[in-house]
Amino acid sequence: MTDFRDVLNRQRFEQGFADTDGETRVVHADYAVQGNTRVILHVEADPALRGTGAAGVFMRSLAEHARAERLKLAPRCSYAVIWLKRHAEYDDVMAA
């Protein structure tokens, strides 16, 4: 796994994970900026990572990043909505 990063010029959060062959693949979330809120528009895992749990680890990293940076998250992507609903420990990073 590589470090979680905010690619500001692309308005995208990314994190790399090794696939079964050891190749680094990326899970990413595209976002829109609304003040200190990041509207999560789309979360996608490289097809080689699907079913490995990488997207869930990515979402945890995203929520931890939001907490550390005092950002709020407004999920619009169905995966992000469901993941955040299932993880009430991150309610503090949810936008009102």
Image (cartoon, rainbow, N blue to C red):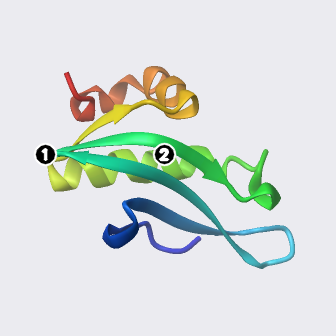
For label 1, the residue is 35
Above or below for 85 versus 44: above
For label 2, the residue is 59
Identify the element where label 1 is drawn: loop
Q: Quadrant of the N terminus?
A: bottom right
Q: Is residue 86 left or right of residue 7?
A: right
Callout 2 amino acid: Met
Which residue sits at x=45%, y=40%? Answer: 41
Which residue sits at x=49%, y=64%? Answer: 14
Question: Which label sits on residue 27?
Answer: none
* Front label number (1 vs 2): 1
Q: Is residue 63 left or right of residue 71?
A: right
Q: Position of residue 18 (x, y in %)?
A: 71, 71
Q: Is residue 4 left or right of residue 46?
A: left
Callout 1 amino acid: Gly
Q: CA distance from mark 1 to mark 2?
A: 21 Å
Q: Position of residue 68 (x, y in %)?
A: 20, 54
Mark 1, other Cα within 10 Å: few <14 / some 14–19 / many ≥20? few
Q: Position of residue 19 (x, y in %)?
A: 78, 68
Above or below for 42 versus 19: above
Above or below for 89 versus 24: above
Determine whether label 1 and label 2 are within 8 Å by CB: no
Mark 2, other Cα within 10 Å: few <14 / some 14–19 / many ≥20? many
Which residue sits at x=52%, y=52%? Answer: 58
Q: Quadrant of the C terminus?
A: top left
Identify the element where label 2 is drawn: helix
